[in-house]
Image (cartoon, helix red, strand yellow):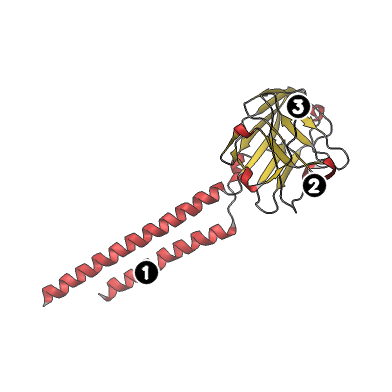
Amino acid sequence: MARLLHLELLLSIKSSGDIMKHTLGVVVAVVTVVVAAMGQAHASVIFSFTEADGNVLMQSSGVLDTAKLVGKERTGWGSAGLQFGRDEDSSTMGDTTMGGVNTAFGFNDGTDFSPWKGDMFTKNYFSWTSSGTTQFATYAIGRNYLFLPGIVLASDDIVGSLWTPDVAWSTSGTFETAGLTTGVYTITDALTAESISIQIGVNESSDDVVSVAEPASFGIVGFGLACAGMLGAGLSRRKSAA
């Protein structure tokens, strides 16, 4: 009889261990997926301007998910440079030295367009040396043919719905001579939080913008960890009782 009880106890412990391993495996899988999603949330593109050794440099980085934007009327762009927004138009930058653009995207209704109006760019400036393979311009055509924040791209540069820029610029001079005003100018979609940021004299990496976790994501991770903790506590009490 004692041997039978001992065998049942061993089987119970083994079964509890298997259940714990399985449940922990599920929890770990859920947490892993959520953490990965957090890293990809609000994938953003950054155009970063810096000054160095008498030159102004621009480097593009990040990833833009065009599926989270709104399709717009296609228009063109010429050369590489900045265009100051007059009246109701937004300021714009673009580069088509490597080819043309043929597909356009804008932001959803309710998006704040004010960051790209004002003195972000103080004049038109097209004296840039350009390198890279992707084409773009940061505008979309709105009502009455206004230039609004958005992006015009070459469809061949979009993989699935993702666009990854590789453009870099350089010119001799300073921010002032290039018509640039120091600051961070970001347009964030009111519905999807997809964003395009123009950073002038501010050292922020693409990771600072791309890795934006939503509060709901933190809640899911916390729930998974809590489940694991309760499961471990329950098994500990079961072993103590045995």
The kind of residue on which mark 2 rests is Ser
Please give the label number shown on residue 78: 3
Q: Are marks 2 and 3 in contact (CB under 8 Å)?
A: no
Q: Is residue 209 visible?
A: no
Mark 2 or mark 3: whose residue is earlier in sequence: 3
Residue 182, horizontal then vertical, whole percent: 77, 37
Q: From mark 2 to mark 3, how far is it between C-alphas?
A: 25 Å
SS assignment at label 3: loop
* Dot in front, 2 or 3: 3
Q: From mark 1 to mark 3, how far is it between C-alphas?
A: 66 Å
SS assignment at label 1: helix
Q: Find disc 1 in the rendering and name its residue.
A: 233
Q: Is residue 194 visible?
A: yes
For this view, does 133 lie left or right of residue 236?
right
Q: Quadrant of the C terminus?
A: bottom left
Q: Nearer the viewer, residue 92 or 27?
A: 92
Please give the label number shown on residue 118: none
Q: Quadrant of the N terminus?
A: bottom left
Q: Nearer the viewer, residue 152 or 102?
A: 102
Q: Quadrant of residue 58?
A: top right
Residue under the point 87% across and 38% down: 86
SS assignment at label 2: helix
Residue 69, horizontal then vertical, whole percent: 67, 46
Q: Quadrant of residue 3?
A: bottom left
Residue 125, horizontal then vertical, whole percent: 80, 27
Crowd class of label 2 (few under 14; some 14 to 19; many from 20; radius 10 Å): few
Q: From mark 2 to mark 1, how far is it between C-alphas?
A: 53 Å
Mark 2 or mark 1: whose residue is earlier in sequence: 2
Q: Nearer the viewer, residue 127 or 101?
A: 101
* Dot in front, 2 or 1: 2
Q: Find disc 2 in the rendering and name its residue.
A: 114
